[in-house]
Amino acid sequence: MPYDSEIIVIGCGNVLFKDDGFGPVVINILQKYAKDENDYYDPAVTAYVEDEFDKEVLADIQGKFEGIQLPEGVQFIDGGTAAPVNFFPLYEDYDWKKLIVIDVVEFDAEPGTVETFDPTIMKIGKYDNPHGMTVEEPLQKIAEKCEVVVVGCKPAEIPTPDVDLGLTEPVVKAIPKTIDLILNEIGVK
């Protein structure tokens, strides 16, 4: 079965709207540099990372994966914008132990601040999604069956409906810490 893994790490968002692409960009970095056996990463996204990111940030990101061996049963998924509707309901069909969601989250912090959130204590409407979908409710239902963690980054700019590619500088600089948090949640750091 395609999502029959113990740990699912899913990036949510849209790379067409600046910082809303945070989740998919992080997932593509994980897929490439963690040597994900599924090899699903998008070459256009990783080319953007390797060509456009500050070289010190890119070196920091690449260094996070030195000596790292992922445990079996970890899967990285680019969920795009429709994860709450198309992917989250799949939890009923699988025996996930942990779901790690990577996304932008509006919270009281400076842009580029990264934190982990427990969706079981988030009030409905706290985890604002730029596409108007409620996210806490499906995650709270999933949390009744498995552990759920949201690794969220405060965005600086989401220009919807205007298309504008590329993450803002504070969000790019947040990616190394984000990777540390994810690897810690997976259990390899």
Image: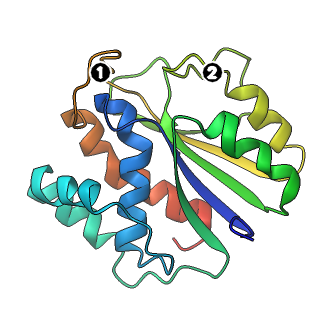
Which percent across, then down, holds residue 63? 27, 72
Q: Which residue is mark 1?
A: 157
Position of 137 with respect to 151 (left or right) is right
Position of 54 with respect to 125 (left or right) is left
Q: Residues within 10 Å of mark 1 (few under 14, many from 20)?
A: some
Q: Residue at x 72, y 43 (%)?
A: 88
**Number of the label disc, if any, that sits on residue 63:** none
Q: Can you say which quadrant of the picture contains the N terminus?
A: bottom right
Whether pointer 2 and pointer 1 mark residues with C-beta atoms closer than 8 Å, the reply is no
Which percent across, then down, holds residue 38? 51, 76
Whether residue 120 is visible: no
- For the image, the number of numbered tags is 2
Position of 152 with respect to 126 (left or right) is left
Amino acid type, callout 1: Glu
Question: Under tag 1, what secondary structure?
Answer: loop
Which percent across, then down, holds residue 20? 39, 31
For the residues carrying marks 2 and 1, which lies nearer the camera in this image?
A: 2
Q: Residue at x 85, y 63 (%)?
A: 95
Which percent across, then down, holds residue 57? 19, 55
Q: Which residue is mark 2?
A: 133
Q: Residue at x 74, y 69 (%)?
A: 6
Precedes in sequence: disc 2 or disc 1: 2
Mark 2 vs mark 1, CA separation in Å: 18 Å
Q: Nearer the viewer, residue 133 or 30?
A: 133
Question: Under tag 2, what secondary structure?
Answer: loop
Look at the picture and state if 98 lies above or below 150.
below
Colour theme: rainbow
- Quadrant of the rendered structure where residue 187 is? bottom right
Q: Residues within 10 Å of mark 2 (few under 14, many from 20)?
A: some
Amino acid type, callout 2: Met
Q: Residue at x 51, y 65 (%)?
A: 183
